[in-house]
Amino acid sequence: MKFIKKKAEQVSVTIHGGDVTPDYRCPTCGMGVAPEYVCCPYCTQRLYFESLLEKAIVAKCQSKESEEGFNEKGW
């Protein structure tokens, strides 16, 4: 049996206390999966993860901080 890796779909981002956590779904069965998973526990689809949204959010926040002249401490 040959396993084909599919990219897990990022469906949302949870922001809690400054931590950004992406939420993913299996591309085959649609069930929620964690980035630690190698394959979906529901349908055994092999997965890989790529968080494009998280990279975009971090880049936007950094550019906004530099525009407003804030340093690391927010001054």
Image: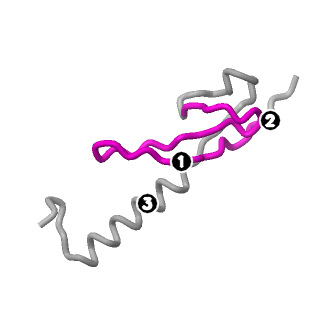
Check the image and report above or below for 20 versus 38.
below
Whether tag 3 and tag 1 are in contact, CB under 8 A, the answer is no
- Tell whether 66 sits left or right of 41: left
The quarter in which the C terminus is drawn is bottom left
- Direction bottom: furthest residue: 67
In the rendered image, residue 23, in percent from the top left (x then y), is placed at 53, 41
* Disc 2 residue type (three-letter): Ile
| Residue that label 3 marks | 57
Please state which of the two labelled residues, at mark 2 or mark 3, is closer to the viewer: 3
Residue drawn at x 33%, y 66% as measured from the top left:
62
Classify 10 Å Cα crowding around label 1: few (below 14), some (14-19), many (20 and above): few
Crowd rating for badge 3 (residues with CA inside 10 Å; few <14, some 14–19, many 20+):
few
Name the mark nearer the viewer: 1 or 2.
Answer: 1
Please name the residue that numbered disc 2 is placed on.
4
Disc 1 to disc 2: CB gap under 8 Å: no
Q: What's the residue type where badge 1 is placed?
A: Ser
What range of the chain is rendered magenta? Answer: 5-34
What residue is shown with label 1?
A: 12
Would you say the magenta stretch is mainly helix, strand or loop? strand
The image quarter containing residue 33 is: top right
Q: Is residue 19 in the magenta section? A: yes
Position in image of residue 10 (x %, y %): 59, 46
